[in-house]
Image (spheres, coloured by chain):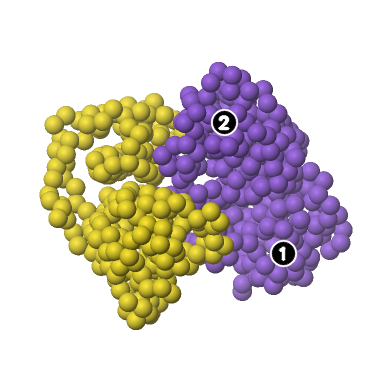
Chain colours: A yellow, B purple
Amino acid sequence: MPIKFSILLNKYKLKYKPLGSIAVLIEWPKAIEEPILKNISIFRNKIHADMGEYVLETVPAYNSLTVFFDTSKIKYSGVVSDLKEIYSTKDQKLLTAYKLWKIPVCYEAEFAADLEEISKHKKLKKEAIVKLHSKALYDVYFIGFLPGFLYLGGLDEKLHYKRRDKPRREIRSGDVGIAGNQTGIYPRVSPGGWNIIGNSPINFFDLNVFPPCFAVAGDKVQFIPIDAEEHARIRQEVESGNYVPKSEIYG
Amino acid sequence: MDNNILILTEGMQTSVQDLGRKGYRSFGVPISGTMDKYSAILANKLLNNAEGLPVLEITMVGPKLMFEDHTLFVLTGADISPELNGEPIQMNQVYSVNTSDVLSFGKLNFGVRTYLGVKGGFLTEKVMGSHSFYDGITQQGKVKKGDRLKIASYENPLEVTSSKIKVKPLHFSTTKLEVTKGPEFNRLTRKQRDKLFSMKFKIDALNNRMGYQLKNKFPPVKNNEIITSITIPGTVQLTPSGKIIVMMRDCPTTGGYARILQLTDMAINQLAQKTENDTFKFDLESSFEFLGRLVSRFRE
């Protein structure tokens, strides 16, 4: 299980690039890995704490962080030098805490249009696929693409499976899919080419609360298998506004 | 009493927009907002409104709408032969209307997007700090026949506004779009860079609030897929098959293609007034020159 840890912020050689005239794009080495995710999260928190005066918003991705600044208060070069100073602070040990979100998912046939196909193709029993998919702890790298879409890392290699040749016109809200080396949850009805193996009855984006997404970059996610009956029960709770996403805090 | 505008026919893509939904990108929420900010701000300025008030964005085919109470309004941007109660009216000119006055549109003369500003602005639902329509964030992505759009009540019928300005035709006709280098610009070879700035680009039928695809095939670039990273309105992406896509105001917050250029905000405004088969060139400018011109344009 996760342990408490501390890391040094200044451990990567970063690149700073302008994004138009309104933002600084900070780039880490080209890799999708947990140490980079942690490093970005810590740097991001420091930026909000130390540069809040003119930083409007920050947007993390796998190996980048974009800092939007108030152009009426500071110039690009000023932002970059402040960022470099914060990042290079010597001997700075920082602790990070994160939440592990327990996401209920029903993998039963009515919610898993493509589970059979993956099972046949991979010569893996459906139960084995569900076990592998729900055993892993996935890292939340960032949210993008659609409001509330979590970019997750950590799908078991045995479950890597190509995107569908023909995308579906409509994928249900909460559908859990696999595409290549990624797994993810559709936060709303949308067309899509992912292979659907289950459905979560909970909402991943709620307009009426702040923040609208319960998970943040740096958190982890685990899928908890539930049956159709429990799916319906949780769905009812969600719809009546009584469902609270379950999480454990670490770090 | 509430003041409304009743939508009699909806037009092609009509929506309420302001300057956008800021601060929610890290939750995957697009910025949205008026495609041609310059024309939208102008509408508000002509009405002595705050420049960021919500306006109605009209696209190529105008709606037909009825004012339910008196107000002042102005139309900026594309000229779609506007008529008030069947009589032709001017662009960029403030008009006063009364109960049951009907605004309609005809032939598209120039441009693509028209802005209808009203005194005090539109008062449709505000979600996450913005009135901008975006399907899934607001209840609807565009207005529909029969909708009643709430607008500010007009308290001061004696106010005289005679503001009329001349908009530079270049805003609509320019064939040069100002850009800065994108994060992956350096992956282009010398030859490709030359081509990028000499080639005449043609807009594809796939052009909307999310993005504009270009018809030209551009030589594919080595390693042009990137690890998914940020995209913002104006980001110019090059796909592995050599397609160029310019992201617009409703674009997703992240993408996986090489970002070779970045349009300036004024260039986004100008592209928003172009459509299928219109042509342009990318023009690499220093940002300082651009800012200088931007300031002087708004002063004019």
Q: Position of residue B194 (x, y in %)?
A: 61, 20
Label 2 sits on what residue type?
Pro
Residue B169 seen from this side: yes
Residue A60 place in picture, x, y as percent: 36, 44
Query: Which of B47/A119 is in front?
Result: A119
Q: Disc 1 residue type?
A: Glu
Q: Which disc is residue B220 wearing? A: 2
Q: Nearer the viewer, residue B68 or B133?
A: B133
Q: Secondary structure at mark 1?
A: loop
Using the image, name the chain to which the residue with label 2 belongs: B
- A200 over A147 or under it: above or below: below
Circles 2 and 1 on the same chain: yes
Q: Residue at x 41, y 39 (%)?
A: B227
> What is the spatial separation of the Cα atoms under label 2 and label 1, in whole angstroms?
41 Å
Pick the residue in front: B257 or B43: B257
State left or right for residue A64 relative to residue B159: left
Secondary element at tag 2: loop
Residue in view at x 64 percent, y 67 percent = B149
Query: Which of label 2 and label 1 is nearer to you?
Result: 2
- In the picture of the structure, the residue carrying the numbered disc 1 is B10
- Quarter of the image where one finds residue B87: bottom right
Looking at the image, the residue that sits furthest to the top is B190
